[in-house]
Amino acid sequence: MSRTVAARRYQVRTIWLALLYAAALLGAVYAFKHQLVGGPAAWVVAVLPALPIIGVFVAIGRYLADEQDEYLRMLMVRQTLWASGFALSAATLWGFLEAFDLVGHVEPYYVAVLWFGGLGLGNCANRLTGADAAL
Amino acid sequence: MINRLKVLRAERNWSQGDLAERLDVSRQSVNAIETGRYDPSLPLAFRIAELFELPIEAIFASPSKGDVA
């Protein structure tokens, strides 16, 4: 399948963001493990790994804005709806289970992980309806 | 939406890729429109009609009437 210009840009952006995420996470873990940061700097270092993940959300938004092919854009919109529905539903269910002390605490950033998993579900849903993958 | 896109394309011996290139869309888009899985926007429907030099209703069936004019 030939990719559109917008899809290629999205792919390049997400590869860079993934590399930045790995570097930021490793750096932050190292810095905290060896107590290299404190005070306001600790806050900055702690949020560094979050920024590339937020960047992926921005990259998806940029893709939707840049994609000239309306059908591929629709497929991606459908994927993000699946992702949002899946992640928010799972987070809501877990939140109530946790509130009633039936399950342990899970860090909220796992919602982003669920959301990316939901993108995969959306991709499967697209394929089940006979569509090729948007990305 | 029922349409004659596949017939019109075949009459010109165009592949889905050829038509996609002429419309400046992906081959997946052409395939989805041909098989009725995706209804094109009005601007894209006009581009298709202009490419085949036909009125839109000669290519796409009216959802209320169900037949291509």
Image (cartoon, rainbow, N blue to C red):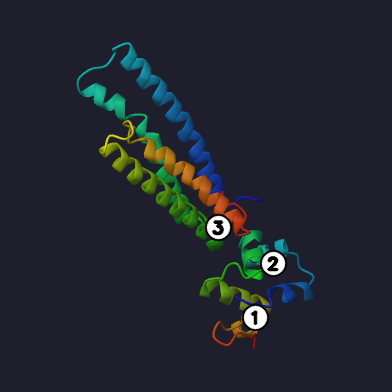
Q: Which numbered tag is attached to residue B10?
A: none
On the image, the x and y values in percent for residue A53 come to 40, 37
> Between marks 2 and 1, how big is the CA–CA gap?
14 Å
> Cα distance, mark 2 to mark 3?
16 Å
Q: Position of residue A132 (x, y in %)?
A: 62, 54
Work out which residue is located at the far left of the displayed protein and give it. Answer: A39
Q: Are marks 3 and 1 on the same chain?
A: no
Direction from residue A123 to residue A98 in the image, left or right: left
Give above or below for B54 relative to A81: below
> Is residue B27 shown above or below A30?
below
Q: Please report contact status of discs 2 and 3: CB closer than 8 Å, yes or no.
A: no
Contact between labelled residues 1 and 2, with CB atoms less than 8 Å apart: no
Number of other residues with Cα within 10 Å of mark 2, as a class: few under 14, some 14 to 19, many 20 or more: many
Q: Which residue is mark 1?
A: B59
Residue A92 position in % (x across, y down) = 33, 46
Q: CA distance from mark 3 to mark 1?
A: 22 Å
Please tell me whether residue B25 is drawn above or below residue B56 in the rendered image: above
Q: Along the line of sight, which residue is nearer the eye, A45 or B34? A: B34
Tag 1 subunit: B
Pick the front one: A117 or A8: A117
Residue A4, given in percent of the width and then of the height, sits at: 59, 52
Name the amino acid, label 1. Ile
**Residue at coordinates 35% horizontally, 35% vertically from top-left?**
A109
Q: Which residue is label 2 attached to?
A: B19
Residue type beneath disc 2: Leu
Nearest-to-viewer mark from 2 and 3: 3
Q: Secondary structure at mark 1?
A: loop
| Residue that mark 3 sits on | A72
The structure residue drawn at horizontal position 27% and vertical position 16%, both measured from the top left corner, is A37
The residue sitting at 33% across, 13% down in the picture is: A33
Corner quadrant of residue A126:
bottom right
